Amino acid sequence: MKTTGIARAHTNIALIKYWGKKDKALFLPMNSSLSLTLEAFYTDTKITLDETLEKDEFYLSNVLQQEAETQKISKFLDLFRIPAKETRFARIESYNFVPTAAGLASSASAFAALAGAMHQAMEWDLSRSHMPAQKLSTYARRGSGSSTRSLFGGFVEWNQGTNSEDSMAIPIDDASWDIGMLIVVVNGAAKKISSRVGMEQTVATSPFYPAWVESAKTDLEEIKTAIQEKNFTRMGEIAEFNGMKMHATMLASQPPFCYFEPDSLVAQQQVVYLREVLGIPAYYTMDAGPNVKVLCKASDLDKVRDHFKQYFSSEKLISSLPGEAMRTLTEEEWQESIQHFNQKGI
Ligand code: ADP
Ligand code: DP6
């Protein structure tokens, strides 16, 4: 017997960062975080549970993945299979409409899409739960922490909670006001130090780490107030401050490490120029990679992008509006998606 599930989840960019785990096995974070889901980047994933399969098979962008990559996915699917005594193996087919492992949050959309597709393939009915997407976010979390937040659209908090059942995503605001983001792809290649390894090293060795955890708490409360008041300037200031504090903890790690590249600094300086000289409100943030994300008003996106064209080629500048929550796809939408991927590629 075969059952299938297909889901699309968008990536998210944290404005208040998740950096550090207090429980590595359960992916319980040291601090709560908050992000903006992006329309421009997403992952589509289909899972077929099939009793004729003799092992899990994982295809990413039409390519059959090696054992190590497949094992990561198998371990994740077992979170669903083992409690339900589900013995079927799975064929997993996934397409990233986002560069993989480049600090553009492919793991966030990946595990949120896997959770959505697996939930459907298992024929679970979480609609009987009073908070289905939140419940599902606790599963996504155990694939990659940041994916917790990709279950919802707009601004989303990942409340650190106290245990595996209550460390979950909470939708904060649908971001249907004047919000946009320009992604400056400084380098789209896979990074050398993954977020997972980078945060572990920081927690273990950075003397700045306790200060990070303390100040992230304050930043989160303040940004939630700014979002509630739709105060763009305040929101941007807090996000920029928080992101740079996270990077400061890494510079103070042993050995020190840094995700910035020379062009990351060029992009940061141009954001400051935009707001201080041209009077366009814009703020930057960066994740575990050299790429710079510019938070600006949706109504200023074209102006911001035009300005950046003086420094970066067009294909490295991707404008995005806020994205939507994870959703399941029909077989017809899935076929369209494959066609789109094969024409466009990423
Ligand atoms: P990123 O900045 O892109 O999130 P990470 O190093 O945190 O980088 O995560 C990248 C990893 O996420 C990949 O090496 C792979 O293991 C996993 N991943 C990315 N895309 C997919 C996908 N579509 N399905 C399953 N796993 C994926
Ligand atoms: C800098 O979620 O990729 O992007 O939980 O180990 O998979 P794991 O890490 P991951 O880390 C994301 C780190 C970040 C900040 C953020 O997204 O909050």
Image: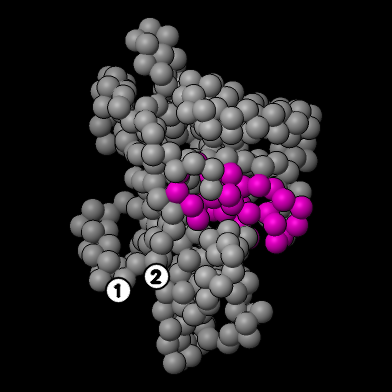
Crowdedness near tag 2: few (<14), some (14–19) or many (≥20) residues, C-alpha within 10 Å:
many
Q: Gap between marks 1 and 2, in whole Å?
A: 8 Å
Q: Which mark is residue 87?
A: none
Residue occupied by mark 1: 331
Crowdedness near tag 1: few (<14), some (14–19) or many (≥20) residues, C-alpha within 10 Å:
few
Q: Label 2 amino acid?
A: Ile
- On the picture, is 241 further left or further right than 263? right
Of residues 169 and 286, the one drawn nearer to the viewer in this rendering: 169
Q: Is residue 108 above or below residue 308?
A: below
Cβ of disc 1 within 8 Å of ligand 1? no
Q: What residue lies at 51% left-to-right and 83% top-to-bottom?
A: 89
Residue occupied by mark 2: 6
Q: Which residues are magenta?
A: 141-170
Circles 1 and 2: CB distance less than 8 Å? yes
Q: Label 1 amino acid?
A: Glu
Q: Secondary structure at mark 1?
A: helix
Q: What residue lies at 41% left-to-right and 14% top-to-bottom?
A: 275
- On the picture, is 57 further left or further right than 342? right
Q: Secondary structure at mark 2?
A: strand
Hey, which quadrant is residue 277 in on the image?
Answer: top left
Find residue 96 and report its horizontal and vertical position in percent. 38, 56
Q: Is residue 258 above or below residue 327?
A: above
Of residues 123 and 247, the one drawn nearer to the viewer in this rendering: 123
Counting residues from the N terminus, which is met first, the one under dot 1 or under dot 2?
Answer: 2
Find residue 93 and report its horizontal and vertical position in percent. 39, 70
Q: What residue lies at 58% left-to-right and 44% top-to-bottom?
A: 157
Q: What residue lies at 20% left-to-right and 57% top-to-bottom?
A: 343
Q: Is residue 50 above or below residue 151?
A: below
Task: Based on the picture, tell me whether residue 154 belongs to the magenta stretch.
Answer: yes
- On the picture, is 96 further left or further right than 16? left
Hey, which quadrant is residue 148 in on the image?
Answer: bottom right
